[in-house]
Image (cartoon, rainbow, N blue to C red):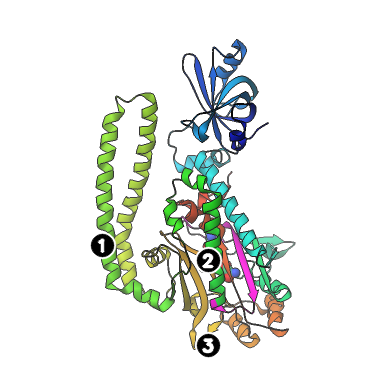
């Protein structure tokens, strides 16, 4: 058996591919089968004159997603997917698929989500999962090569880490347990044992928000470092992101092309990233420049929409007379244009809302998704915002020694409107202050005894952050919604499949 990725090594030789029918079309004497085997796609041609009657009849029975073993000669063919074509000699049918529910024409996203178990086979979904894999591997490499120890934090926990409003409660032998919101607190304990650690695990938030950035179950990577202050923490976060982007560009370039990701945008991601304080960010939102920029953006979008509508009209005019192959192309192109037009329409609806919310931003309020979009608008790279009002941040955040209203927290905002991908900061290391914070946040001291111990026995300055894996995948793949960044997304209204 040969995998499709290995085909170039077998030019001019006979191979057997084991896979599935991705697409099939038949003319009088030829059947074209695009085979997928998990590693890629390969077109194979069955010519009635070159195969036995039995093989020809087998080819005619195939349906999309039928499982086959196909044997043939590898020919170099520039026009074919992957630059090679298989000239078939023999076919072994492993199983004939029933009529496949997902066809190349457009389906609504609800339908696709209900068929997620099959949708994963589609080209773009396939590419996104491979980029996810590249990112996961890059993260492990980044930390492992820098002496970090990977640790697994518990999933059942007795206490909240990130606020009590979005906890999933479970029955733990007649006691209450919660699904973890973050491995951080346990990571802090391990950092005191090993110096530098990172967690890589599932985390849970009973988020009632139905946005394109929220899942109820998502994967978080949380490094925690003893003797790190906030600037060191930010340096690390920046290095990690640059490394991940480089790895994706190097290892997953083909997938990015399939996803139609504008690769040049990722090529611009270089250190240093802008670092602005929360206070500066609020000023930026309130500025007249921001209002002007949004007006300019609206103008630009309107022009783009006009252009696209003209293109659409000419495609529509062409469609009637077009041949079958061209019709398929036109359909695809129309799909792309309509998707972009929907985005533009959404932007145009949003811009007045953004303008208003930017002007009304007051010191002390947390940033919402639209604020994050506006704050990164001018930058090709992510932006780090540090020094948040302590009020909006978690109990464990250390305060700025020069201003007690400010927490030494940092968020990293991805460009192109992808929003917060990292949240982190320096931790409170003083026992008395931490006790005070627990009270202020109405958190039960009893549950945090172990955590407080870390401040009794050799407390040191320490910092860390959490990277949201799915939001990172969405950004790097250019996906509008996190539901396509994880094999089986869990969201407020979704538990199936
Ligand atoms: O900002 P968050 O809530 O920070 C923490 O949990 C800290 N304990 C991390 C730390 O310092 N060790 O979450 C971190 C990141 C966010 O920036 C975002 O990327 C992602 O996790 N995230 C979510 N991703 C998908 N769906 C959700 N509901 C998410 N909530 C947070
Ligand atoms: Mg956050």
Q: Is residue 400 magenta?
A: no
Figure quadrant of the N terminus? top right
Query: Looking at the image, which is closer to me, 181 or 53?
Result: 53
Query: Looking at the image, which is closer to me, 303 or 274?
Result: 274
Q: Is the C-beta of the residue carrying label 2 under 8 Å from the nearest atom of ligand 1?
A: yes
Q: Residue 290, located in which quarter of the rendered image?
A: bottom left
The numbered dot on residue 295 is: 1
Query: Looking at the image, which is closer to me, 75 or 260?
Result: 75
Q: Residues within 10 Å of mark 1 (few under 14, many from 20)?
A: some
The residue that mark 2 highlights is 422
Q: Residues within 10 Å of mark 3 (few under 14, many from 20)?
A: few
Question: Can residue 494 be seen in this snapshot?
Answer: yes
In the rendered view, tell whether residue 239 sits above or below residue 341. below
For the record, the magenta segment spans 203-231
- The location of residue 334, given as percent across then percent down, is 35, 38
Q: Please tell me whether mark 1 sits on a helix, a strand or a loop.
A: helix
Q: Please tell me whether mark 2 sits on a helix, a strand or a loop.
A: strand
Question: In the rendered view, does 29 fall on the left or right side of 354?
Answer: right
Contact? badges 2 and 3 (CB < 8 Å): no
Q: Residue 457, located in which quarter of the rendered image?
A: bottom right
Question: Which is nearer the N-term, disc 2 or disc 1?
Answer: 1
The residue that appears at 29% across and 63% down in the rendered structure is: 294
Question: Which is nearer the N-term, disc 2 or disc 3?
Answer: 3
Q: Report how far apart the C-alphas of labels 3 and 1 lie in the structure.
A: 40 Å
Q: Report how far apart the C-alphas of labels 2 and 3 lie in the structure.
A: 23 Å
Question: In the rendered view, does 209 fall on the left or right side of 283?
Answer: right
The residue that mark 3 highlights is 401
The residue that appears at 53% across and 77% down in the rendered structure is: 231
């Amino acid at each position: 058996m040969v995998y499709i990725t290995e085909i170039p090594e077998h030019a001019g030789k006979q191979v057997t591919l084991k896979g599935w029918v991705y697409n099939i079309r038949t003319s009088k004497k030829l059947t074209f089968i695009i085979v997928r085997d998990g590693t890629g796609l390969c077109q194979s041609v069955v010519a009635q004159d070159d195969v036995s009657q039995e093989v020809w009849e087998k080819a005619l029975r195939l349906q999309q997603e039928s499982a086959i073993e196909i044997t043939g000669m590898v020919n170099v063919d520039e026009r074919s997917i992957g630059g090679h074509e298989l000239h078939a000699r023999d076919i072994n049918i492993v199983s004939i698929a029933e009529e496949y529910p997902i066809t190349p024409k457009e389906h609504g996203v609800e339908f696709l989500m209900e068929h997620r178990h099959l949708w994963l086979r589609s080209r773009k979904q396939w590419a996104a999962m491979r980029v996810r894999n590249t990112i996961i591997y890059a993260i492990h490499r980044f930390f492992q090569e820098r002496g970090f120890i990977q640790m697994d934090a518990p999933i059942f926990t007795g206490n909240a880490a990130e606020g009590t409003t979005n906890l999933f409660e479970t029955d733990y032998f007649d006691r209450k347990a919660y699904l973890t919101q973050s491995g951080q607190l346990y990571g802090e304990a391990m950092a005191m044992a090993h110096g530098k650690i990172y967690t890589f695990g599932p985390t849970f938030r009973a988020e009632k928000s139905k946005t394109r950035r929220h899942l109820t179950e998502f994967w978080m990577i949380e490094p925690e470092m003893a003797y790190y202050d906030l600037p060191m923490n930010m340096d690390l976060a920046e290095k990690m992101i640059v490394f991940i982007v480089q790895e994706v560009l190097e290892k997953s370039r083909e997938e990015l092309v399939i996803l139609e990701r504008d690769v040049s945008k990722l090529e611009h991601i270089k250190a240093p990233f802008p670092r602005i304080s929360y206070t500066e960010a609020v000023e930026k939102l309130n500025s007249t420049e921001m209002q002007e920029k949004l007006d300019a953006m609206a103008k630009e979008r309107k022009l783009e929409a006009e252009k696209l509508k003209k293109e659409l009209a000419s495609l529509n005019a062409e469609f009637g007379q077009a041949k079958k192959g061209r019709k398929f192309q036109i359909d695809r192109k129309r799909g792309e244009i309509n998707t972009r037009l929907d985005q533009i329409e959404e932007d145009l609806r949003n811009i007045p809302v953004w303008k208003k919310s930017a002007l009304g931003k007051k010191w002390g309020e947390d940033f919402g998704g639209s604020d994050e979009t506006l704050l990164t608008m001018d930058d090709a790279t992510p932006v780090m915002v540090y020094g948040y009002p302590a009020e909006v941040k978690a109990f464990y955040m250390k305060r700025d020694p020069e201003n007690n209203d400010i927490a030494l927290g940092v968020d990293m905002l991805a460009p192109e409107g992808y929003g917060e991908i990292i949240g982190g900061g320096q931790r409170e290391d003083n026992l008395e202050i931490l006790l005070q914070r627990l009270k202020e946040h109405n958190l039960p001291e009893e549950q945090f005894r172990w955590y407080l111990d870390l401040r009794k026995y050799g407390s040191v300055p320490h910092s860390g952050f959490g990277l949201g894996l799915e939001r990172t995948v969405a950004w790097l793949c250019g996906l509008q919604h996190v539901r396509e960044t994880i094999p089986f997304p869990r969201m407020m209204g979704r538990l199936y499949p």
